[in-house]
Image (cartoon, rainbow, N blue to C red):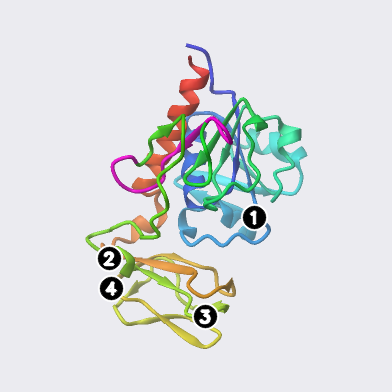
Amino acid sequence: MSNVSGLIVLIKGAGELASGVAHKLNQCHFKVCMTEILQPRAVRRGVAFCEAVYEGEKEVEGVVAKLISSPDEIFQVWQEDKLPLLVDPETKVKDILNPNVLVAATIAKKNLGTKISDASLVIGLGVGFQAGKDVHAVIETNRGHNLGRVIIQGEAEPNTGIPGEIAGVSAERVFRAPKAGRFSTNKKIGDYVKAGEVVAFVDGVPVKVLVSGVIRGLLRDGTGVHKGMKAGDVDPRGIKEYCYTISDKSRTIAGGVLEALLSRFNG
């Protein structure tokens, strides 16, 4: 078996699912670097490394991502045993870092420019990628029997638009922007709420939750939104600790990425 722990992995995106991948690969001693846009709009901010863009650093389950301003800082941050995160919407750092692996994890539901020639192994998460054409492998992100499956020919299942079920609750646990405008809230992730409670406003229009539980995801106060945009979600199980730990879905997808990586480089 070859030693793969020193491989450099560049992850495009630092939202919830990308962060789950980054966390697992970091724990397996890969050299992980992440890129993000200038104003990321993650909902599951408790477990999203992209919060480092606003806070400077973000810790998820003992792993810390650190915002850097230049690719020159990457190796120093690795020496600090942290994940370097760079605001780099066009992923220009790829040409400097020359990663062994590139993971397209923006979950944009379309390919934003990822090419199969970007690295020795290019992996796409979810819909928008064709394995064997755009990327070497696609990881299934749709909840169900195939979640986390490594696809080496073809595409992931079509997006259903239906949130995953938690404690028997699906679409009702998600709250969305009632109109375009500025999202404002004085609630925090981890707060307990009751069905029908107002948790936020969009330009004065109230946003109510439909189920009782704990706020697991919530946009940052002041975020610009469009009508129907996901603004947060409630976990009806009501267990506050789940707001700050990686989800079963994210861990399963991360396992698929790890399988694709080891299958290529341990062969």
Mark 1 or 4, closer to the camera: 4
- In the rendered image, residue 186, in percent from the top left (x then y), is placed at 49, 78
Q: Tell which circle, 3 or 2, labels the residue nearer the N-terminal end.
A: 3
Residue 145 lies in the magenta stretch: yes
Number of labels in the image equals 4
Residue under pointer 3:
179
Residue under pointer 4:
212
Question: In percent of the image, x 68 and y 58: which residue is there?
Answer: 38
Q: Is the magenta stretch mostly helix, strand or loop?
A: loop
Mark 3 or 4, closer to the camera: 3
Q: What element carries label 3?
A: loop
Q: Which of 39 and 53 is in front in this view?
A: 39
Q: Is mark 4 on a helix, strand or loop?
A: loop
Q: Distance between the residues labelled 3 and 2?
A: 25 Å
Residue under pointer 2:
236
Question: In percent of the image, x 66 and y 44: which residue is there?
Answer: 113
Residue under pointer 1:
56
Residue type beneath disc 2: Pro
